[in-house]
């Protein structure tokens, strides 16, 4: 997986069918300050996960929808204008002050 940083968060990029399919399912619990960028994507689920996550829907780097503490075994809303989704450890949105209508800048690691 490619790695980038988004506003100081180290992010793995899931940009193939298999990587998007697996997502965060193979993790016991995500670490604060790390995440998974799923692209292309405009809806996610937490079936099979044993922990809540924060989700951030992006459109060209702009946050168009963000939800804190999405519990396991849920389906997110379909955000038609999103081109990617950032999955993060629960609490990351608050810790990094990520909210709707902000832009996340990235650089390759």
Image (cartoon, grey):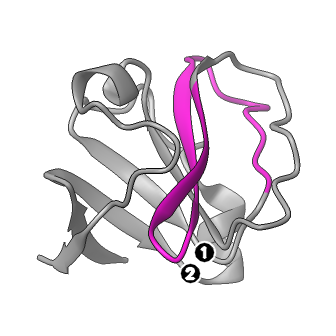
Which quarter shows the C terminus?
A: bottom left
Q: Where 56 falls versus 91 (above or below)? A: below
Left or right of 11 in this view: 24: right
Snapshot quadrant of residue 25:
top right
- Residue furthest to the front in view is 101
Precedes in sequence: disc 1 or disc 2: 2
Residue drawn at x 86%, y 40% as measured from the top left? 77
Question: Which SS class for mark 1?
Answer: loop
Q: Position of residue 56 (x, y in %)?
A: 54, 46
Question: Which SS class for mark 2?
Answer: loop
Snapshot quadrant of residue 106:
bottom left
Mark 1 in CB contact with mark 2 (< 8 angstroms)? yes
Residue drawn at x 13%, y 52% as measured from the top left? 8
Residue 39: image tag = 1
Dot 2 alpha-carbon crowd within 10 angstroms: few under 14, some 14 to 19, many 20 or more: some
Q: Position of residue 36 (x, y in %)?
A: 44, 55
Magenta region, residue range: 43-67
Residue drawn at x 52%, y 42% as measured from the top left? 100
Q: Does 51 appear in magenta?
A: yes
Disc 2 marks which residue? 15
Q: Where 31 falls versus 9 (above or below)? A: above
Residue 79: image tag = none
């Amino acid at each position: 997986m490619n790695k980038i940083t988004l506003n100081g968060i180290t992010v793995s990029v899931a940009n193939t069918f298999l990587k998007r399919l697996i997502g965060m399912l193979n993790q016991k619990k995500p670490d604060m300050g790390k995440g998974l960028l799923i692209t292309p994507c405009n809806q996610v689920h937490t079936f099979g996960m044993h922990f809540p996550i924060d989700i951030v829907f992006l459109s060209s780097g702009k946050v168009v929808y963000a939800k804190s503490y999405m519990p396991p075994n849920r389906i997110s809303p379909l955000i038609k204008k999103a081109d990617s989704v950032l999955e993060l450890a629960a609490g990351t949105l608050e810790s990094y002050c990520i909210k709707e209508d902000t832009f996340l800048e990235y650089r390759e690691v």
